[in-house]
Image (cartoon, grey):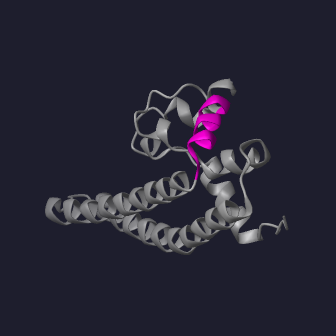
């Protein structure tokens, strides 16, 4: 099996995904215990596996070259999408912040801009969920079981 090194941009994406708080935390909710390796109480996140968990245990999981290439392809696809969405979200958030700085806030404009911010947040969440689903679908039942064991064993 030939191992290809992970490119710097892909490594950056993995680092951002690994270090960024779960989406729920961005909304003021408590992050899922699954994000920290403990038994998941999140009924959705507990069924999905972050790419860095798979990558760090690829030998234990028996990830073959076809699976590795497919996972890398999915990560590269996400890498092409996330920066654009994050830039758009940042710009929309700045616009909302500016509207909220006014001495007298135009409620209709602020709510419309908040709607744009929430639409972009939803788009990012859907893209991230789609990535995790596609990666999970590349794994065998045995690999998914092993990942659940690894997650439970990690403090």
In x, y percent, where is residue 154?
A: 69, 28
Tell me the quarter of the picture where residue 57 sits.
Answer: top right
User: Does the magenta portion include 145?
Assistant: yes
In x, y percent, where is residue 21?
A: 55, 44
State whether residue 23 is above or below residue 5: above
Q: Nearer the viewer, residue 114 or 107?
A: 114
Which residue is located at x 43 percent, y 32 percent?
A: 42
Which residue is located at x 19 percent, y 66 percent?
A: 109
> Dividing the image into 4 quarters, which one contains the N terminus?
bottom right
State whether residue 94 is above or below residue 61: below
In x, y percent, where is residue 86?
A: 49, 66
> What is the number of callouts on the image?
0
> Dividing the image into 4 quarters, which one contains the C terminus?
top right
User: Does the magenta portion include 20?
Assistant: no
In x, y percent, where is residue 124?
A: 42, 61
- Name the dominant secondary structure of the magenta segment: helix
Which residue is located at x 16 percent, y 59 percent?
A: 107
Q: Nearer the viewer, residue 11 or 118?
A: 11
Please state if 116 lies on the left or on the right of 49 as rendered: left
State whether residue 17 is above or below residue 34: below
Residue lying at the far left in this picture: please name it: 108
Range of magenta residues = 139-150
* Residue 39 seen anywhere in this rendered image of the structure: yes
């Amino acid at each position: 099996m030939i191992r290809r090194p992970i490119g710097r941009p892909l490594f950056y994406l993995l680092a951002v995904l690994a270090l960024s708080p779960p989406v729920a935390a961005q909304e003021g909710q408590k992050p899922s215990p699954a994000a920290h390796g403990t038994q998941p109480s999140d009924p959705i996140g507990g069924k999905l596996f972050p790419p860095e968990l798979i990558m760090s245990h690829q030998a234990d999981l028996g990830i073959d070259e076809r699976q590795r290439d497919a996972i890398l392809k999915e990560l590269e696809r996400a890498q092409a999408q996330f920066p654009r969405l994050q830039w758009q979200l940042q710009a929309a958030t700045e616009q909302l912040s500016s509207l909220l700085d006014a001495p007298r806030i135009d409620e209709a404009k602020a709510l419309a801009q908040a709607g744009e911010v929430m639409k972009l947040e939803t788009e990012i969440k859907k893209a991230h969920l789609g990535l995790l689903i596609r990666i999970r679908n590349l794994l065998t039942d045995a690999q998914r079981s092993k990942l659940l064991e690894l997650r439970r064993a990690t403090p």
